Image (cartoon, rainbow, N blue to C red):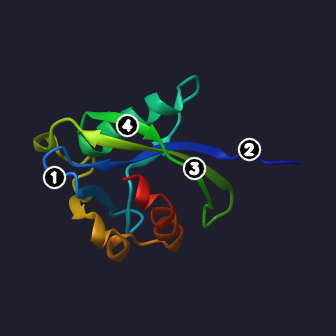
Amino acid sequence: MTTRKVQKAGAVIVSKSNPNNILLIFRTREQDWSFPKGHIEPGESRESAAIREIKEETSLDVALLRKLSSFEYEYPEGGAVLVHMFLAQSLDDSTLNTEHDTDELQWIDKERILEKLTHENLKSYFLEIQTLI
């Protein structure tokens, strides 16, 4: 019996005011630095889900610039997740605001992204896609 993978969508978001900066989110509940992403709702396209999740987690409106490769991971408690990723650009950096008061958002120079990301799979993913940014 094959278990269905949880489908998520997210983005590597570049700053409108400084294209060398990429947005990362610190999620207090998970205690990690990551790219904004979240679940795809039933009937929702990957693109719509990415835009919605980014708006919810960061308050930013973004333009999706291109589809990036997807990646997979396992939840610690079990279950596979497939994340569909996009390259996006903020339309107005000044609207940045977290969904949860305890979370944190930071624009990080792309040369420092690997230092900031928490999980090895995200570091490997960023190494694969960094030439597209």
Dot 4 or dot 2: first in sequence order is 2
Instruction: Kindly indicate whether the residue at mark 4 contacts the one at mark 3 (C-beta within 8 angstroms).
Output: no
Q: Position of residue 81 (x, y in %)?
A: 62, 52
Quarter of the image holding residue 54?
A: top left
Q: Which residue is mark 1?
A: 18
Q: Looking at the rendering, which quadrant does residue 110 occupy?
A: bottom left
Is mark 2 in CB contact (under 8 Å) with mark 1? no
Q: Tell me the residue that label 2 is attached to.
A: 4
- Residue 82 in percent (x, y) is at 61, 49
* Residue 70 disc label: 3
Q: Residue furthest left?
A: 94
Q: Nearer the viewer, residue 96 or 125?
A: 125
**Type of residue at label 4?**
Leu
Q: For the residue marked with disc 2, what is the amino acid? A: Arg
Q: Which mark is residue 65?
A: 4
Circle 2 or circle 3, nearest the eye: 3
Taking the spot 37% from the left edge, 35% from the top edge, the residue there is 64
